[in-house]
Amino acid sequence: MERFSITTPIYYANGRPHIGHAYTTIAADVLARLNKKLGKEVFFLTGTDEHGAKVADTAVSVGKEPQEFVDEIAQSFKDCWEKLDIQYSDFIRTTDKRHELGVHLALNKLKELDLIYEKTYSGLYCAGCEAFVTEKDLDENGLEPLHQKKPIVVEEKNWFFRLEKFLPKIKQAFEDNKILILPSERKNEVLGLFQQGLEDFSVSRSREKLKWGISIPFDDTQVAYVWIDALLNYVTALGYGSDNRELLQRFWPADIQTCGLDILKFHTIYWPAMLLALGLELPKQLLVNGYFTINGQKMSKSLGNVIDPMALVDEFGSDATRYLLLSAFPYGNSGDIDVNNFQTKYNELANTIGNLVRRTFNLAEKYGVKYERISNNLLEIYPQLNNENENILEALIKLVRSQAQELNVGIDSEAPWKEADEIKRNEIVAKYLKKVFELADLLEPVMPKTALAIFDSVDESGKITNPPILFPKKV
Ligand code: MSP
């Protein structure tokens, strides 16, 4: 059986999930479901990034112990994914014991191979990024642009990773598309990083300053740098760190790793370097999503415009929420999510897909036209969808939309209800019935409940017995 594995970034456990997290997770879920439907054995990994100063500080600010706090946050992510019908295979938490074991194994190995060394470093540190920054990264007010925070000067003795050694090989992997970067415009951006000059990075932090982290097995004064800890989740979840390497063999390298453009450098420089250092294979594709704004503004707690995906599900249902977020603008671009559009787009779903299904099923019921489902339409359509240079998520959404529209127009113009010849009339109805089921195959990865409602509306004999009301009008 062919296999397919996909990962999302693991989300910071310093707050409840918002639609930014939901956006990336839905996209990965759609790709996972698509591949399942193509008959592949799928592994879809997501989880939470639970260590670091940011998380520890937030826990203190709400009067909780870090562990208690992250337990609650991790649960809120799981609840949210359940509500959004996210079918992940595993949810890794960086406070899991299995993860800690894997991080220890990796650090020990890097030390053994002399790929890390101790050095005193002084530099500017942005607590928002959990990373060192340089003067040239700052804006005119001396603030780190993304978090609008003033970096602090940090001087520490840390363990550093010999990055330089791996850079040519990583660059080559991108140039040869061994790691395919999609959308392809991002590739130049990544290649540009190599021009900038990349320095060795630290894999540890002083324990004095950061208590909430994974210990360094050979140095009690240090804990693992949160990004090193976090990136390793992609393999610790598969058993790196345990004796059982079966999943690692089956599902690593990942076919697709998704990440936001904000964390591109970590996924294109540090992560591949660590993989090479540890003797693990490089992922095959990096699918990068843009950053969105809400009604033209950056989404932030202080602006009070953070949208809870659960509230959207309460309003529109999980299928429509998945569709509304994914179809807001082409995946990979940065764009704006105009929440005022959601209602209009929901109505569009009701008027196209909802309407088409209702009319077709009513006609089939009325004229006793049966339907026998024999093939999975996605298998036929997939080669046409899967053009490497095209954005498959975008292509899928577009096709669902255009097919629903075309079918509505088609059934109107063929108007079987006006056809006097009974045989001809039933043939037309049968044709549209078939097309509705084909559409259901196509939309299933994006809107699984809708597809299921369509599949379940027909009994064993092919008779329509249970026509669903899709995207009901809200009162
Ligand atoms: N914990 C790190 C990732 C570690 S991966 C080894 C992290 N977490 S995060 O919660 O801040 O963001 C994770 C991802 O969420 C981003 O890369 C991005 O894909 C998604 N998004 C968060 N906010 C978003 C928007 N406003 N717009 C689009 N995606 C957003 O970084």
Image (cartoon, grey):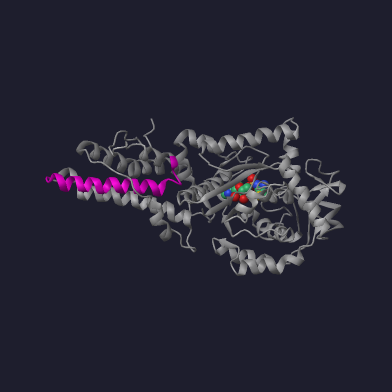
Q: Residue at x 60, y 69 (%)?
A: 176
Query: Which of these two is toward me, 125 or 87?
Result: 87
**Is 443 one of the magenta-colored residues?**
yes
Query: Which of these two is toward me, 74 or 147?
Result: 74
* Above or below, comparing residue 239 to residue 269 in the picture: above
**Is 70 one of the magenta-colored residues?**
no
Q: Is residue 130 visible?
A: no
Which region is colored magenta? Answer: 420-448
138 sits left or right of 318 in the view:
right
The overriding secondary structure of the stretch rendered in magenta is: helix
Query: Which of these two is toward me, 73 or 297?
Result: 73
Q: Quadrant of the C terminus?
A: top left
Query: Which of these two is toward me, 126 or 103?
Result: 103
Q: Is residue 401 visible?
A: yes
150 sits left or right of 410 in the view:
right
Could you tell me residue 240's position as x and y percent? 70, 49
Q: Residue at x 43, y 53 (%)?
A: 396
28 sits left or right of 138 in the view:
left
Could you tell me residue 120's position as x and y percent? 87, 56
Could you tell me residue 88's position as x and y percent? 56, 43
* Above or below, comparing residue 433 to residue 70 in the picture: below
Could you tell me residue 221's position as x and y percent? 88, 46
361 sits left or right of 399 in the view:
left
What is the number of callouts on the image? 0
> Which residue lies most toward the left here?
420
